[in-house]
């Protein structure tokens, strides 16, 4: 009989440890993400993500500002990992992602963080920017699951992923929560230093959907398994919002839950940027929401302009900007 969360099935068979060992070997010549740095992180060498083979964590705590089906009533057990494989000029968490705020910890310590969050009543373990630390995460998960961890695992990513790495996570991750940041590779390079972002991102989202499908929730509306996609609307339509949303509807599923995010404000290196140096306007966001509806998506989540609080829209309700 299959157990839930999914990683418990791999724990019982010994496959979870085997996957952890396979991933750990990649640290010796790192090809976890599209950069394929091929440096030995176990020897302290640093690639694009500026990370060794020890997970680096900024914070671990219940978080109540995620989508309602992720945060629920008791919070999402977020673990914010330091550093990143992108260089977004507008990153709102640049102190963590770009400046490396945080502390290196062992796999045992990471496992204890997971167990602590479960003890606090969190609905899930939410791994924020996990890509460059996947081997450490799966190793810690195997330890934590062996000690009784039994809540869903959320993979909260910028979407710059390799299918080959995601395939190793099949049966481990319960909920994928990726970004779809851009619909043009040249824009991705300019503002996030991410070569071929669109190609890698679309392939990754297809693989994630193959693994977990549409979002499934319990009787209380808390996510148990599935894919949810986030799209941050940028000024001047730099994100290519209409085409990005059409991709989700036409090539994944119209039932995919999609967060159309309105929280953009210029920060970090975007403050003085000629194209990104202003906040989103109500008209720009209204247009993005209209595109989401016109694309045929059924499960659209929207935000109040400039807010990080997500709400589920009722298509009969009044326009929130009136």
Image (spheres, grey):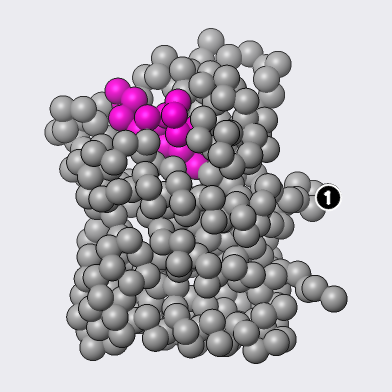
- Tell me: 235 left or right of 149: left
Which residues are the magenta region? 230-245
Q: Position of residue 285 (x, y in %)?
A: 44, 22
Q: Position of residue 193 (x, y in %)?
A: 22, 49
Q: Nearer the viewer, residue 304 or 213?
A: 213
| Residue for point 67% across, 51% down | 213
Q: Is residue 239 shown above or below 128?
A: above
Q: Residue furthest top?
A: 322
| Residue for point 44% across, 72% down | 134
Q: Nearer the viewer, residue 179 or 296?
A: 296
Q: Which residue has dot 1 on it? A: 219
| Residue for point 22% across, 65% down | 48
Tag count: 1
Residue 243 in the magenta stretch? The answer is: yes
Q: Is residue 113 visible?
A: no
Q: Position of residue 6 (x, y in %)?
A: 69, 70
Q: Is residue 241 visible?
A: yes
Q: Position of residue 62 (x, y in %)?
A: 56, 60
Q: Is residue 42 shown above or below 55?
A: below
Q: Quadrant of the N terminus?
A: bottom right
Q: Secondary structure at mark 1?
A: loop
| Residue for point 59% across, 42% down | 252
Q: Residues within 10 Å of mark 1 (few under 14, many from 20)?
A: few
Residue 257 in the magenta stretch? The answer is: no
């Amino acid at each position: 009989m299959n157990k839930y969360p999914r990683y418990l099935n791999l724990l019982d068979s010994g496959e979870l440890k085997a996957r952890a060992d396979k991933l750990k070997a990649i640290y010796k010549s790192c090809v976890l993400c599209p950069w394929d740095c091929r440096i030995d992180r176990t020897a302290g060498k640093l690639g694009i993500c500026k990370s060794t083979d020890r997970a680096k964590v900024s914070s671990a705590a219940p978080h109540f500002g995620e989508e309602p089906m992720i945060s629920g009533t008791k919070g999402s057990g977020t673990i914010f990992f330091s550093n990143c494989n992108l260089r977004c000029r507008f990153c709102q968490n640049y102190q963590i992602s770009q400046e490396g705020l945080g502390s290196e910890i062992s796999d045992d310590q990471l496992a204890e963080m997971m167990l602590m969050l479960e003890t606090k009543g969190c609905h899930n373990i939410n791994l924020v920017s996990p890509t460059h630390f996947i081997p450490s995460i799966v190793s810690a998960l195997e330890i934590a699951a062996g000690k009784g961890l039994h809540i869903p695992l959320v993979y909260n990513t910028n979407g710059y992923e390799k299918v080959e790495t995601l395939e190793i996570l099949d049966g481990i991750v319960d909920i994928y929560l990726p970004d779809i940041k851009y619909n043009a590779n040249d824009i991705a390079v300019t503002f996030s230093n991410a070569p071929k972002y669109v190609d890698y991102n679309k392939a990754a989202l297809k693989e994630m959907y193959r693994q977990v499908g549409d979002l499934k929730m319990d009787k209380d509306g808390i996510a148990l398994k599935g894919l949810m996609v986030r799209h941050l609307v940028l000024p001047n339509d730099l994100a290519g919002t209409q085409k990005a949303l059409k991709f989700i509807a036409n090539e994944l599923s119209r039932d995919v839950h999609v967060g159309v995010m309105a929280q953009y404000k210029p920060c970090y290196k975007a403050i003085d940027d000629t194209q990104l140096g202003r906040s989103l306007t109500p008209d720009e966001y209204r247009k993005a929401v209209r595109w989401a509806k016109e694309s045929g998506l059924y499960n659209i989540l929207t935000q109040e302009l400039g807010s990080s609080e997500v709400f589920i829209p009722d298509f009969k309700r009044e326009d929130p900007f009136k």
